[in-house]
């Protein structure tokens, strides 16, 4: 349940991070050209300082969430796909050595 929630948060963070990176001003302007005149909302420097801080914060959350997901998935005691196949087919599982049959020997009877 926890991993499902963190996985959903991870997808949302990815989408927000991509949007934040694409909105930043670059030499080719990117999608920042479509944001309108944001200078009055974000201050005299425009959205560049705000978007840089937001991108850093979202990136930090993304890394922390990735580490948490990795820890939770690795600590789960689930068998891998290969382990499940071995249990079903027993092809790769080592088998106990079987005893080889020994031919009966002829016993000599003592003389009477």
Image: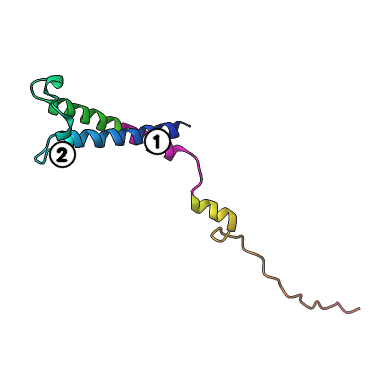
Q: Which mark identifies residue 7?
A: 1
Q: Quadrant of the C terminus?
A: bottom right
* Residue nearer the viewer, 89 or 26: 26
Q: Is residue 13 left or right of residue 5?
A: left
What is the magenta range? 64-80
- The residue lying at 22 percent from left, 33 percent from top is 20
The question of residue 11 being in magenta is answered with no
Q: Quarter of the image holding residue 90?
A: bottom right
- The residue lying at 37 percent from left, 33 percent from top is 68
Q: Quarter of the image holding residue 25?
A: top left
Tag 1–tag 2 contact (CB < 8 Å): no
- The residue lying at 40 percent from left, 35 percent from top is 7
Q: From where the camera sits, is residue 83 visible?
A: yes
Q: Is residue 1 left or right of residue 41?
A: right
The question of residue 66 being in magenta is answered with yes
- The residue lying at 47 percent from left, 38 percent from top is 76
* Residue nearer the viewer, 105 or 76: 76
Q: Is residue 74 left or right of residue 32?
A: right
Q: Does residue 75 lie above or below 36 as drawn? A: below
Q: Quarter of the image holding residue 47?
A: top left
**Secondary structure of residue under mark 1:** helix
Crowding at dot 1, Cα within 10 Å, few <14 / some 14-19 / many 20+, comes out as: some
Residue bearing the label numbered 2? 30
Going from the N terminus, do you reach mark 1 or mark 2 first?
1
* Residue nearer the viewer, 92 or 7: 7
**Secondary structure of residue under mark 2:** helix
Given the current orientation, which residue lies at the most extreme right position? 112
Residue 96 picture location, percent across and down: 61, 60
Dominant SS type (magenta): helix
Residue 78 picture location, percent across and down: 50, 42
Crowding at dot 2, Cα within 10 Å, few <14 / some 14-19 / many 20+, comes out as: few
């Amino acid at each position: 349940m926890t991993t499902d929630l963190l996985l959903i948060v991870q997808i949302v963070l990815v989408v927000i991070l991509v949007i934040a990176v694409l909105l930043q001003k670059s030499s080719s302007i990117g999608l920042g050209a479509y944001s309108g005149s944001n200078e009055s909302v974000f201050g005299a420097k425009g959205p560049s300082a705000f978007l840089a801080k937001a991108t850093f914060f979202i990136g930090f959350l993304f890394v922390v969430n990735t580490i948490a997901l990795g820890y939770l998935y690795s600590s789960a005691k689930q068998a891998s796909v290969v382990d499940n196949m071995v249990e079903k087919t027993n092809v790769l599982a080592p088998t106990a050595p079987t005893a080889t049959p020994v031919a009966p020997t002829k016993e000599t009877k003592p003389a009477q």
